[in-house]
Image: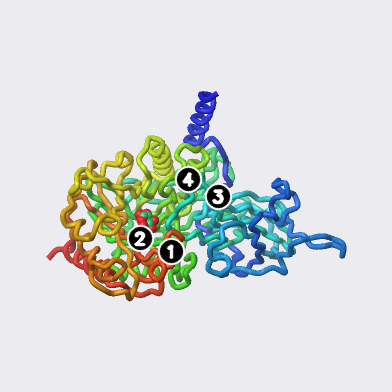
Amino acid sequence: MQNKVGALLTILFILAMTGQAQQRPALITNIEGRHTIDLNGRWQTIIDQYETGYYDYRYQPSTDGYFKNAKPKSPGDLIEYDFDASEQLNVPGDWNSQDQRLLFYEGTVWYKKSFDYQKKDRTRLFAYFGAANYLADVYLNGQKLGRHEGGFTPFNFEITNLVREKDNFLVVKVDNKRRRDAVPTLNTDWWNYGGLTRDVNLVEVPDTFIEDYFLQLKKGSTDEISGWIKLSSVTAGKVVTVEIPEASVKQSATTDASGYAPVSFKARLNLWSPENPKLYAVKVSSDADSVGDRIGFRSIETRGTEILLNGKPIFLRGICIHEESPLRGGRAFSEDDARMLLTWAKELGCNFVRLAHYPHNEHMTRLADKMGIMVWSEIPVYWTVLWDNPETFLNARNQLDESITRDKNKASVILWSVANETPVSDARIKFLKGLIDHARKLDPTRLLTAANERHYADPNTQLIDDPLGEYLDVLGCNEYVGWYDGLPEKADRLQWKITYNKPLIISEFGGDALFGYHGDAGVRWTEEYQKNLYEHQLGMLKKIPSLRGMTPWILTDFRSPRRPLPHIQDFYNRKGLISSRGERKEAFYTLQNFYRDLVKERAGP
Ligand code: GCU
């Protein structure tokens, strides 16, 4: 019996690894370049902790749940819910920061939006969600469209045949309950914001439309664009065209039997970089459709311990960011939120940000493209997920897929990270190697990394030898010398030993400080302690020969259910360099000065 179960799990795992297990509706890319109708705004909501609107009293899925948006037809009719008389919440937005009763709420909230729609000939319609945390069941006019799992990536459903002229009702059951087999799993050090946390749009496209495209420089090249265009229909012989007027490019190609048209052509380009975030107007068209985009072209690769941007060695002056608007105390979702966070990072002297620990909203990566900030993008394989569970793997791979699909044409995104602080084991290697291979298949142009841990070879030597390093292009390492590991001065006597000849990014270091709490540098939680910690850390790190970047933890204080210390944390992680009211702590200037000096040093005399 045991062998049979073992064999079945292995078969399921191989199927998962080779992607045979399940088909998903194709994700439409570049919504900004399409014709959309936004459904943002006030949505009717029902808080449904017991999922009464989904299960019957036998805990069987009900055929007559809240997704029916039912109304009493006669005085005797028994309907025990009424969306239109219920409270409203803003979309996009998490429910936790909008209603004090929901601050700690984990469970189901039903959302309903009514809309009319003028149907058009030869036009298809999709409902597109920027994200919903965590599990979303989506219905239109009482019909189930599908389910999406994962709180930080986009998804869409086709509604062409279900939509009507009047009184459509789009209903979404959003459940942010944490689960052991989920991604992320039960414990995280960030707030489990629930809801329709990002934009919701209706997207109109022609019968056969440009579903997706990948246009980036070929690996190692600075003048050859290579990629593909995918039409929504699997028809061979369809002509598609790429135009980049400013670079005098007009290139046509023909689809194969799967609807893909590979493209590859030379172009004289002004390359994208932080100093010159050049974006080109690009038009992708077919006989029935055309999509406009703004794309930057840059090459990113490694050579030994160097990271090369457009062939030149770079140093990544970074900071970690959570997708939270400190001033509002909720999930960040808008272009203004993104601009505030990225402008603060620029003020710090950054040319790089680590968007932790999950794909942030598309406003962040689009703005990073425009502002010239390089991006580390990560999926929430965080701490200890269920490595042996094929469904958990599929879920993680699906989130990676959707993240890459959405951002693969963003010049700012240079690194895909598949994990954060995961424990070394064979099952974990197998799981993460599966993700790395998948990412390389989807995107052969970018670098793969993960935020791993280090350990001590001896009391004065920190060793980076995580076996996962073998499969990565860039090593990421989180270390908390001076906070969880000794006092700040300990950094002065530590050596580093790295078993790989690869570039290293210190993807986290830092310590908590409550803004305005001052005292001796040896007193924890004071600004002086945090400043002192940064001084000793930066002194240690700059001695590491293969160090090619750092992203200290973290730009701003952020909410965490793991941080209850009264009058200091109050459910905030206080490792920000900026407080939850936007105030700069002393260590903010320590890092700003360090980055300023680094720029001077690298600029040379
Ligand atoms: C970890 C983790 C972060 C966490 C941080 C901390 O390394 O990656 O998510 O917030 O440390 O403890 O503050």
Q: Amino acid at mark 2?
A: Cys
Q: Are marks 2 and 1 in contact (CB under 8 Å)?
A: no
* Residue 257 image position (x, y, % from top left): 54, 38
Nearer the N terminus, badge 4 or badge 1? 4
Q: CA distance from mark 3 to mark 4?
A: 10 Å
Q: CA distance from mark 2 to mark 1?
A: 22 Å
Q: Amino acid at mark 4?
A: Ala
Residue on which the image places disc 2: 320
Nearer the N terminus, badge 3 or badge 2? 3
Q: CA distance from mark 3 to mark 2?
A: 25 Å
Q: CA distance from mark 4 to mark 1?
A: 30 Å
Q: CA distance from mark 2 to mark 4?
A: 21 Å
* Residue 25 image position (x, y, % from top left): 58, 47
Disc 4 secondary structure class:
helix
Disc 2 secondary structure class:
strand
Q: Quadrant of the rendered structure where residue 506 is?
A: bottom left
* Residue 546 image position (x, y, % from top left): 21, 50
Q: Is residue 521 left or right of residue 391?
A: left
* Residue 386 image position (x, y, % from top left): 47, 41
Residue 396, label in figure: 4
Nearer the N terminus, badge 3 or badge 1? 3
Q: Amino acid at mark 1?
A: Pro
